[in-house]
Amino acid sequence: MTREEKLNEVLENRVDALYKEHQARWAAMEPTELIGMAKKIAAIQSVYEEMGGSGYREDIVELLLQADDPLELVSNEWLAYSAPDLHTGIDNVLYEACGKIRLGPQNASVSDPEDFPELSGGGSDGQMTGQRM
């Protein structure tokens, strides 16, 4: 086994142990606390799955092993990297949701689009105007 492989094994074992510690903390939390941590928990789970069994370069592994909790460190970076800009993306999401409502109740969770006239658009072509409701 090469030095790089040994270091990767050490990292994998450490990440496994850290993940179990995170799981134990989550198990002790109240449901409302867990709900508030949903994004963080999902990030830790995703990073844990990705880091398991992956062969990283020796220099990367050496640096990660210097961190108190490399799993949390990488998951925090992943959250920062992958966080969508909800403010600018919400208009697109609203437009898509309203389009499904216009197609009929089978395509949306709203049973009667007539109950929500504010979602009917407002532009001359029936499209969303981009104005906030």
Image (cartoon, grey):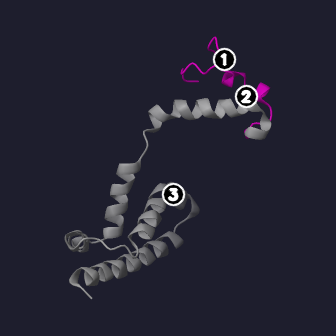
Disc 2 vs disc 3: which is toward the camera? 2
Pointer 3 residue:
38
Q: Which residues are magenta?
A: 108-133
- Compare marks 1 and 3 and give the one earlier in the sequence: 3
Identify which residue is drawn at 75% across, 36% down: 110
The amino acid beneath tag 1 is Gly
Pointer 1 residue:
126
- Magenta region, mostly helix, strand or loop? loop
The amino acid beneath tag 2 is Arg
> Could you tell whether 76 is left or right of 94 in the image?
left
Contact between marks 1 and 3 (CB within 8 A): the answer is: no
Identify which residue is drawn at 44% across, 72% down: 22
The image position of residue 85, as x and y in percent, is 42, 39
Pointer 2 residue:
102
The image position of residue 132, as x and y in percent, is 54, 23
Contact between marks 2 and 1 (CB within 8 A): the answer is: yes
> Could you tell whether 102 is left or right of 37 in the image?
right
Disc 1 vs disc 3: which is toward the camera? 1
Identify which residue is drawn at 55% across, 65% down: 30
Q: CA distance from mark 2 to mark 3?
A: 32 Å
| Mark 1 secondary-structure assignment | loop
Quarter of the image where one finds residue 101: top right
Task: Please check the rendered image and state whether residue 90 is part of the magenta-colored stretch, yes or no.
Answer: no
